[in-house]
Image (tube, rainbow, N blue to C red):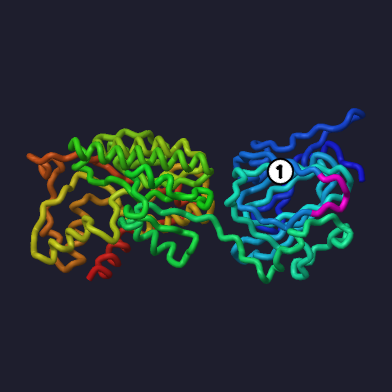
Amino acid sequence: MGMEFQKKLAATETPIPGMLLFDLPVYGDNRGWFKENWQREKMMALGLPDFSPVQNNISYNDKAGTTRGIHAEPWDKFVSVATGRIFGAWVDLREGPTFGSVFTAELDAGKAIFIPRGVANSYQTLEDNTSYVYLVNDHWSADAEYTFVNLADETVGISWPIPLEEAELSEKDMAHPRLAGVTPMAAKKTLVLGADGQLGKALRSAYAGDPSVEFADRSSFDLLDPASFGSRNWRKYSTIINAAAFTAVDAAETEEGRQAAWALNVTAVAELSRIAVAHGLVMVQVSSDYVFDGSRPSHDETEGPSPLGVYAQTKAAGDAVVSVVPRHYIIRTSWVIGDGPNFVRTMASLAEKGVSPAVVNDQIGRLTFSEDLAAGIKHLLDVGAPFGTYNLTNDGEPRSWADVAADVFELSGRPRGNVTGVSTAEYFRGKEAAPRPSNSVLDLAKINGTGFRPELADTRLKGYLQNSK
């Protein structure tokens, strides 16, 4: 069969999710042919994930009928033909609804295929002296976990061009289990750090029952201990969600607090980012309205940082580090309220005790309830939103801290007038305190554009107080 020259580069989706079949432009004349076997930029524009190959392998086969497989490997793979022709058969052995799905195709030098991790592949040569090449995005290792299915499985039902009884096979391949006996390859894991904080607890609820999500608190992953970073087999992970941070804003202004804030918010984040780059992981970093000085009426994702205090500076530095990770989400949020000590619970307790507090009235922003923050992070990951920075708070009219306190008092059955508004300067007079942004309102247009619309802060506040009783 003659090879077709000068086709246009094109990608075709297959029945197996994530697997793409490519037509490659091949240019030939009386001397032979030339092709761009793998071209990252052009192929990514057609849907190829940026899978970052790290190893190039070649399989040479003397005879037509040489058949290898069916093997599912714990890495992504891009396969193309150098010489000859092959018949390829692929079976989805990943956990999920497409387990057992089959796709077959004939490949020559003018075609290539991208195979996601966990999709089993098998190749039968159709000509003597056939070679095929594959790029993989992890180095081979002896402890790599494979999954197999038998070449002759009746359920899979592959119609081999050269019958298996006439093909060149290995005894090992023929001994693989039938589909009914195959244990599906589990998805790579998401690691949530800081899992016992307000956001961490909300992420536990958001991912409840999902075995692919692993939660680590300080006792199981101490971000200040270098040994923690070497305690994981990072090949088994796809995503890190860093919900841990030093958030004691005023304590960060002290010598001890400054060192602790930089250690947790920058040094540890830099090490996580290094791991994410080395292993091609998605890195989710939770940032803060404090990276801005609050001089604008609202802050969108294009605004550069202008941090005021030490805590703010460490969060801005952490964002800068994470921004160089190719696959990252920086989630900027403000005024987080969840399961743990927080401003709303403090005000509700004061209302119950009959205390009339003085509360700052010249800092403006929106509350962020941790359940919505967790849901927004999960949404970005689930829909594969474009990587980058996103603002994420609850929606509605911005409020001052005094307004929020008055809302809490009113919902607790106390008069709003029991809350007295004071300026930031007056509230902190005579106290050691970090500077605060005067306006923490974050523009939500970008995350709304991904299909996620956070609940109104007023609605969440009512529900939060009712559930806290």
Confirm whether the magenta stretch covers residue 86.
no
Question: What residue is rendered at 78% in x and 70% in y?
Answer: 154
Q: Mark 1 points at which residue?
A: 134
Question: What residue is rendered at 59% in x and 52% in y?
Answer: 144
Query: Mark 1: which secondary structure?
Result: strand
The answer to whether one can see residue 23 in this image is no
Whether residue 229 sits left or right of residue 66 in the image: it is: left
Q: Considering only vertical position in the picture, is 171 above or below 313?
A: below
Quadrant of the image occupied by residue 347: bottom left
Question: What residue is rendered at 36% in x and 54% in y?
Answer: 220
The answer to whether one can see residue 168 in this image is yes
Q: How many labels were placed on the picture? A: 1
Report x, y in % for residue 195.
Answer: 35, 56
Span of residues in magenta: 61-67
Report x, y in % for residue 54.
Answer: 61, 39
Which amino acid does the dot numbered 1 rest on? Tyr
Whether residue 189 sits left or right of residue 64 in the image: it is: left
Whether residue 318 sits left or right of residue 67 in the image: it is: left
Report x, y in % for residue 169.
Answer: 81, 56
Q: Considering only vertical position in the picture, is 274 above or below 63?
A: above
Q: In which quarter of the image is the C terminus?
A: bottom left
